[in-house]
Image (cartoon, rainbow, N blue to C red):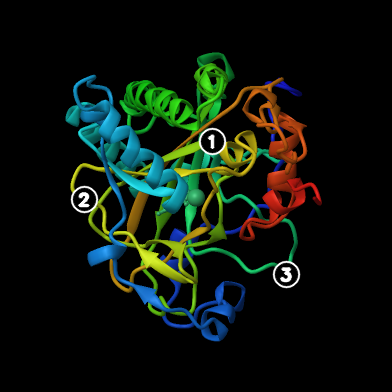
């Protein structure tokens, strides 16, 4: 199965050692490739998310209830326009599904390396167990392992990369993916409506779009201030719905020149606007750079569900959304081509988006 729907459809990544395995055999010294000098040079003001700097909270139940939806939609618009990040509560995804997903992915990462490697990324592929964005021998590495899988639409799944250990994994992921996608589609509807002018188009495209799920495993690190769990980046998709598996914090996003640490509310999803929405709406909403830090003694797991367009769709400003006198600020690229661009270089801020910009 090669080509459009098969192995290597988004490009690949050079294989590197599992960080979890590395952590297990390491006594003190962190290998040079993981030491990030920028962590020392960078002058950042940490904002703690209290008072005015509290990340917006959107109540999904209110958003879809006609009695409350207009007020909640206003809040959603502000969250998208001013923050690019929000927490989603009362999303209606069954607790059972969420719990099973958390348990199964925790079990998966606990398996011996050889067992996990049964679903290792094949050469030239970024799906499966491994790491992405490694494109050179001397490049700095992130302190994390991942399991990355296309989950929807069903015919795009690379089933041989879906774990069968724990035995319930596939069924659990199928239910999780389906439930999360429903919520994402409703969010796209609400976002579309907020964007105005013929903007149902955004939701129409996204409804038939691709969902990819990335499980991130961040092992603890004796020197957490010297490494990065996940390099600063924006997501090259429409919308990301992130679930933390435990209470261990680590996600930070750019806000007022500093990094704002996210303290997830119990049961909430952390949602963020990705580059594809920024491009489609010609910059009305912006994707926001974020990164993940690691903990000194506790491992951290997160589940990112990415929602984007489908093969054959164009990532570009939607013509119907351009108002008179608007400059077209971004180029257009077919989805697969766009994704290949994303995985071709190392993960670096909003660099893909910068390359998509038209000089106006
Ligand atoms: C991602 C991401 C953050 C986290 O996977 O794109 O931003 O907290 N993850 O794991
Ligand atoms: Ni991200």
Q: Tag 3 or tag 2, which sits nearer the N-term?
A: 3
For residue 195, above or below residue 296: above
Q: Residues under labels 2 and 3: Cα distance? A: 39 Å
Which residue position is annotated with label 2? 265
Frontmost residue, 299 versus 186: 186
Q: Which mark is residue 138?
A: 3
Q: Indicate the secondary structure of the residue bearing disc 1.
A: loop
Q: Which mark is residue 238?
A: 1
Q: Position of residue 16 (x, y in %)?
A: 62, 57
Residue 113 shows up from this direction? no
Give the left or right position of residue 26, taking residue 322 as reference.
left
Residue 49 shows up from this direction? yes
Which class describes the residues within 10 Å of circle 1: few (<14), some (14-19), or many (20+)?
Answer: many
For residue 258, above or below residue 265: below
Q: Which mark is residue 263?
A: none
Q: Tag 1 or tag 2, which sits nearer the N-term?
A: 1
Frontmost residue, 339 versus 158: 339
Point 74% across, 43% down: residue: 341
Q: Indicate the secondary structure of the residue bearing disc 2.
A: loop
């Amino acid at each position: 199965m090669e080509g459009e729907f098969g192995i290597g459809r988004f490009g690949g990544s050079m294989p590197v050692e599992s960080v979890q395995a590395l952590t297990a055999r390491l006594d003190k010294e962190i290998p040079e490739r993981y030491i990030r000098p920028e962590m020392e040079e960078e002058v950042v003001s940490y904002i703690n998310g209290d008072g005015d700097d509290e990340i917006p909270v959107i109540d999904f139940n209110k958003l879809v209830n006609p009695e409350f939806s207009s007020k909640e939609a206003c809040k959603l618009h502000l969250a998208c326009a001013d923050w690019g990040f929000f927490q989603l509560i009362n999303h209606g995804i069954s607790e059972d599904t969420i719990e099973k997903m958390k348990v199964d992915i925790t079990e998966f990462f606990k398996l011996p390396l050889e067992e996990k490697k049964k679903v290792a990324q094949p050469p030239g592929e970024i799906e499966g167990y491994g790491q992405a964005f490694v494109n050179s021998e001397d490049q700095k590495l992130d302190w994390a392992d991942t399991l990355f899988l296309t989950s929807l639409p069903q015919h795009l799944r690379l089933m041989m990369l879906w774990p069968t250990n724990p035995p319930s994994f596939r069924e659990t992921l199928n239910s999780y993916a389906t439930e999360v996608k429903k919520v994402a589609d409703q969010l796209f509807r609400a976002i579309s409506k907020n964007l105005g002018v013929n903007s149902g188009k955004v939701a129409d495209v996204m409804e038939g779009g691709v969902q990819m799920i990335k499980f991130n495993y961040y092992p603890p690190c004796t020197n957490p201030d010297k490494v990065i769990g996940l390099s600063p980046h924006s997501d090259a998709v429409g919308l990301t719905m992130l679930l933390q598996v435990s209470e261990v914090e680590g996600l930070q996003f750019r806000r007022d020149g500093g990094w704002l640490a996210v303290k997830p509310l119990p049961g909430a999803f952390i949602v963020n606007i990705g580059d594809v929405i920024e491009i489609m709406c010609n910059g009305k909403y912006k994707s926001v750079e974020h990164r993940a830090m690691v903990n000194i003694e506790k491992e951290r797991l997160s589940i990112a569900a990415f929602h984007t367009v489908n093969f054959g769709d164009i990532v570009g400003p939607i013509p119907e959304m351009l108002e008179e006198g608007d400059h077209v600020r971004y180029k257009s690229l077919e989805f697969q081509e766009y994704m290949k661009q994303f995985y071709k270089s190392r993960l670096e801020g909003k660099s893909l988006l910068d390359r998509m910009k038209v000089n106006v």
